[in-house]
Amino acid sequence: MVPGGPRLLTYPDPKSWSELGEWWLLELASDPAYENVVTPMLIDLLRPEAGKSYLDLGSGEGRVMRKVKAFGAKVHGVELNSGLAQRSGEVGPTEVGELPDLSAFDSESFDGVYCVLVLEHLSDSDRLFAEGARVVDRNGVFVLVANHPAWTAPGSTPITDSEGEILWRPGAYFGEGTTEEPAGQGRVVFHHRSMSALLRSAAASGWCLENIVEAPHPDLEDQSGIPRLLGCRWRREP
């Protein structure tokens, strides 16, 4: 879900997420974007290796964990919603906890961490990158898939011109701020940060960028030139 625009799957704000497990499962059932675009982007960037261990930051019901585990990797999760954590626990050990807190995990205990459509719903990206750097081995990786920051700023919205073409107003891109969208009986909160702020946040914790990809919305041919998803792969400085 991008504020004001066509829906992509998202991760609700932690304050309401504990009550939105059923809403999340309905979202997964009704939106093919996660299976067809989001997860493949994650796998292409992560390149899971057999025998290595990965931590899913916001594991939901374990959908992405299953894909990573299929490569012979060991998977662990951290998830705020206890009902969803129980489901992902059937795939791999899952800790019930609120991101960006990873204190339940020992330092240098994973080969990589990944975060799928979660970071934009957390207010403290600096701490998540720092905690991710702490829990991975030297030379470990961090992979992020997120809603593209070009369209998460307050005031960002699609507009239609006189000929019916859909364009985008980017909003206050260079600032910070939040927007909200309805999610079942709760609300989804988006925390906006620019691309440069995101990359600086990762670099400050010792993450070296190895790859970055952008993708349009998977179901909107008339918006094929508009980036809607961002994917990054970083490696921890040795």
Image (cartoon, grey):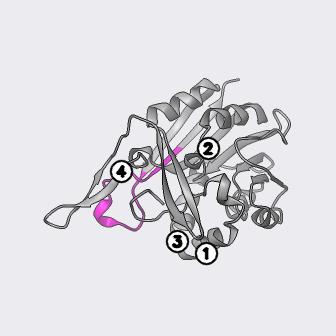
Relative depth, front residue between 224 and 228:
228
* Residue drawn at (66%, 46%) of the image: 114
| Residue carrying label 2 | 143
Work out which quarter of the rendered image holds the C terminus and state it.
top right
Q: What element carries label 3?
A: loop
Q: What element carries label 1?
A: helix
Q: In this view, does 79 lie above or below 175?
A: below
| Residue carrying label 3 | 32
Relative depth, front residue between 70 and 88:
88
Q: What element carries label 2?
A: strand
Q: Which numbered marker is on residue 156?
A: 4
Q: Position of residue 33 (x, y in %)?
A: 51, 66
Mark 4 or mark 1, which is nearer the start of the sequence?
A: 1
Give the CA distance from mark 1 to mark 4.
Answer: 26 Å
| Residue carrying label 1 | 26
Tell me whether the residue at label 1 lies in contact with that at label 2, contact meaning CB atoms closer than 8 angstroms.
no
Please state the extent of the stretch shown in magenta in the rendering. Answer: 215-231
